[in-house]
Amino acid sequence: MSLLDLITGSAGNQVAEQAENKFGISKNQIIALLVVAAPLVISYLKKKSENAEEADKLNAALDRDHDGSILNNPSQALDREQEGDSILSHIFGGEKANVENQLAQNTGISMDKIGPVLATLAPVIMGYIGQQKQASNVTSGGGLGDLLGGILGSSSQQVQASNDPLSNILGSVLGGASQSSGGGLGDILGSVLGGGNQQQSQQGGLGGLLGSIFGK
């Protein structure tokens, strides 16, 4: 399963429908958030995994809590919101509020709901990473950087061959992530949301792309 398959397939649609009912936010906005949040989380985990200790912690967490089974029953994500919030706090640290603010601006989801919705999606994203870890037979933290980079790289290739609106948005996000040079969360966030390629700059950045598709 590619990142695009996660977002546009059964798992992404099911969790978006469940979250729509719970939070009163349109399914399209939730899918738009998943399009941006999944590459952002994967990009930052890739950076963190360059530290051997962090890589080992991530590997242990994936083995313990994220075997991919959530993808077979995405509705359980709604019961794991508190866990998802803890995941995001660990990933983003002191930048968590800034991440949520930027994502709210780009997806049109209000600040009082962006955190809970993002926390609902986090276990699904981690479950996807865990599934890919098992499929690739990565058994230690040392292989996680290559695994995460491979997820982003193969997704970039897939979206280039597609021409649907969600693929265009995902391609812009992935393009921005690949241009992050400094490696810190601020650099990754800025690259992903600030306009990683010419198409983004012509349409006002990612917010322009999302707005043109979802009527923000």
Image (tube, rainbow, N blue to C red):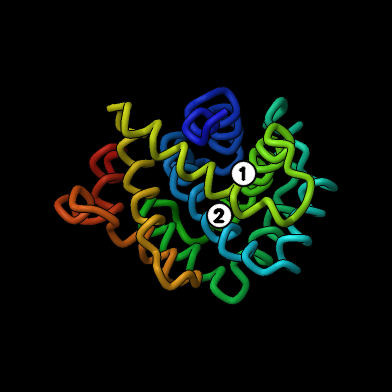
Residue kind at label 2, given as amino acid type: Val
Is residue 30 depicted above or below 164 in this figure? Answer: below
Q: Which mark is residue 41?
A: 2
Q: Is residue 75 visible?
A: no
Q: Tell me where residue 177 appears, x and y as whole percent.
A: 41, 56
Q: Residue at left 54%, top 73%? A: 95
Tell me the crowding category of disc 1: few under 14, some 14 to 19, or many 20 or more residues within 10 angstroms, Cα based: many
Q: Which mark is residue 100?
A: none
Q: Residue at left 58%, top 49%? A: 148
Camera-side residue: 168 or 117?
A: 168
User: In the rendered structure, are the residues bearing label 1 and label 2 in contact, judged by CB atoms less than 8 Å apart?
Assistant: yes
User: Is label 2 in a helix, a strand or a loop?
Assistant: helix
Q: Quadrant of residue 130?
A: top right
Count of numbered marks: 2
Q: Residue at left 59%, top 67%? A: 92
Q: Which quadrant is the N terminus positioned in?
A: top right
Along the horizontal axis of the image, is 157 left or right of 127? left
Along the horizontal axis of the image, is 45 left or right of 102? right
Q: Which residue is mark 1?
A: 125
Q: Tell me where residue 110 appears, x and y as whole percent.
A: 45, 56
Q: Is residue 47 visible?
A: yes
Farthest right residue?
64
Tell me the crowding category of disc 2: few under 14, some 14 to 19, or many 20 or more residues within 10 angstroms, Cα based: many
Q: Tell me where residue 72 appears, x and y as whole percent.
A: 71, 25
Q: Residue at left 79%, top 45%? A: 139
Along the horizontal axis of the image, is 195 left or right of 36? left
Farthest left residue?
202
Q: Quadrant of residue 12?
A: top right
Return the disc, 1 or 2, that comes first in the chain's sequence: 2
Residue kind at label 1, given as amino acid type: Ile
Q: Quadrant of residue 186?
A: bottom left
